[in-house]
Image (cartoon, rainbow, N blue to C red):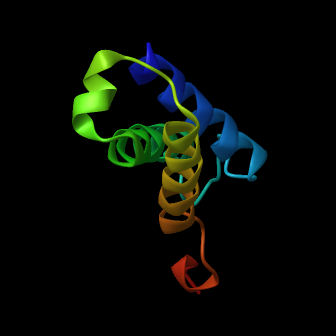
């Protein structure tokens, strides 16, 4: 159950953090942030909960905190930067 909840938390965090799906003319495939948030939450939740505990499927407070932190880190990593713009 936790493997379903963590990516959902990550996708919501990515959208709330302003990294939702956007279409731009110069970068049409710039909607990877919700997927990065979901993956980051999955990784962060599994690391924070510990792999043996994560396999049991229990949702703990530490796993939720790890999912939030993982989603924020991965969303920050794929954010748009001013240096990414073409002149």
Whether residue 31 is visible here, answered yes or no, is: no
Residue 69 quadrant: bottom right
Residue 37 placed where, x, y %? 52, 45
Q: Is residue 71 above or below residue 35?
A: below
Q: Whole-percent x and y of residue 74? A: 47, 57
> On the rendered image, what quadrant is the N terminus found in?
top left
Point 35% across, 44% down: residue: 43
The reply, left or right, for residue 25 in relation to residue 63 is right
The quarter of the picture where residue 57 lies is top left
Residue nearest the viewer, comparing 23 with 40: 40
- In the figure, is residue 61 to the left or right of 46? right
Closer to the camera, 34 or 51?
A: 51
**Which residue is farthest left?**
52
The answer to whether one can see residue 8 in this image is yes
The vertical placement of 40 against 84, above or below, is above
Q: Residue at the spot x=24%, y=36% of the render? A: 51
What residue is shown at x 45% (from left), y 21% (from top)? 2
* Badge count: 0
For the C terminus, the image quarter is bottom right
Residue at image x 58%, y 57%? 72
Location of residue 77 in the rendering, given as x and y in whole percent from the top left corner? 48, 67
Tell me if residue 34 comes above or below residue 3 in the rendering.
below
* Residue 67: % across, % down: 52, 43
């Amino acid at each position: 159950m936790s493997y379903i909840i963590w990516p959902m938390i990550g996708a919501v965090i990515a959208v709330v953090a302003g990294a939702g799906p956007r279409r731009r003319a110069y970068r049409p495939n710039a909607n990877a942030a919700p997927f990065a948030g979901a993956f980051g939450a999955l990784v962060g939740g599994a690391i924070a909960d510990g792999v043996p505990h994560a396999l049991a499927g229990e949702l703990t407070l530490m796993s939720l905190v790890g999912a939030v932190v993982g989603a924020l880190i991965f969303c920050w990593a794929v954010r748009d930067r001013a240096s990414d713009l073409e002149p």
